[in-house]
Image (cartoon, rainbow, N blue to C red):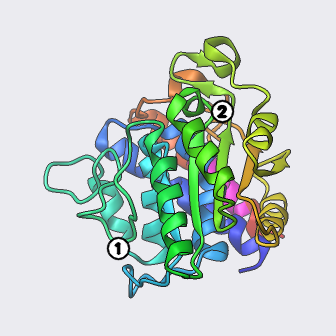
Amino acid sequence: MTILELQKMAVEVRKGIVTGVHAAKAGHPGGSLSAADVFTYLYFEEMNVDPKNPKDPNRDRFVLSKGHTAPGLYSALAHRGFFPVEDLKTLRHIGSHLQGHPCVQHTPGIDMSSGSLGQGISVAVGMALSAKLSDESYRVYTLLGDGEIQEGQVWEAAMFAGARKLDNLCVIVDNNGLQIDGPVADVCSPYPIDKKFDAFGFHVINVADGNDMEQLKAAFDEAKTVKGMPTAIIMKTVKGKGVSFMENQVGWHGKAPNDEEYEIAMADLEKAGEALCQK
């Protein structure tokens, strides 16, 4: 896809996030919206995946380590064709395959159940090691929150990945600066994030604007050239990106919009989509 096509798709992914969380009357819109662009880039450009064959042994793997932002992953999967977009309206409903956190048993395209923060990256490291041991060519991607990396297990996994030189692993940190209790720098500062991953033997790529498709493309293109060490992409994003009243507001970490707020949010996104159509 072209950069413009990816930008347009990211708007649709954001609409799916807002629609799902509104229908559920619960969920995590803030971090889903900040990561909407990277979800879009991964599933529509970067990763080798096939919606018609979601269990293809040669597919690239993705682990959503910050599992509470499942609405973003679900929306990307639905728009990519893994299941109907209409299913997004069943988020968190009884009997739906789209629960509050990803479940590998029930949802096409999900490679790992996640949600207990810190654990996803460990599984991703295991997947990457498995590929090396089996001489398989697939790559493994995992997305972490900047609040999540306060978990000690993250750094155990990073130490192992660096020691094993897992150059088929790409760790992405969504650095939107906010977690459930406030700014990450105030709760328990993870900074400097880049130097920490560097110390664990990662090739580090800093992305000044992780909501910019061109910058994401440059980062992932660089990551694929790295040999002999895993890659960490640290991307600065805006929590709640694309919805005016949610942007940089910590209260929207885990709260659903009411009917009036839903209409405003969808109007914001519709306007953004129309602006892209003028390009």
- How far apart are the two marked residues, 1 and 2, measured between alpha carbons? 29 Å
Asked if residue 43 lies in the magenta stretch, the reply is no
- In the image, 18 versus 56, the foreground residue is 56
Whichever of labels 1 and 2 marks the residue nearer the N terminus, that label is 1
Please rate how many residues cluster around mark 2, counting C-alpha atoms within 10 Å: few if below 14, some from 14 to 19, many from 20. Answer: some
Give amino acid for label 2. Glu
The C terminus: image quadrant: bottom right
Mark 1, secondary structure of its residue? loop
Residue denoted by label 1: 83
The N terminus: image quadrant: bottom right
Q: Residue furthest left?
A: 95
Mark 2, secondary structure of its residue? loop
The secondary structure making up most of the magenta span is helix
Locate residue 5, reporting x and y percent: 71, 74
Locate residue 40, reporting x and y percent: 61, 64
Name the mark on residue 164. Answer: none
Q: Residue at x 79, y 55 (%)?
A: 212
Locate residue 138, reporting x and y percent: 57, 78
- In the image, 43 versus 190, the foreground residue is 190
Residue 109, located in which quarter of the rendered image? bottom left
Name the mark on residue 247. Answer: 2
Give amino acid for label 1. Phe
Q: Residue furthest bottom?
A: 52
- In the image, 48 versus 165, the foreground residue is 165
Asked if residue 270 lies in the magenta stretch, the reply is yes
Q: Residue at x 69, y 28 (%)?
A: 177
- In the rendered structure, the answer to whether residue 262 lies left or right of residue 106 reads right
- In the rendered structure, the answer to whether residue 135 lies left or right of residue 110 reads right
Provide the residue span drawn in magenta.
Answer: 267-274
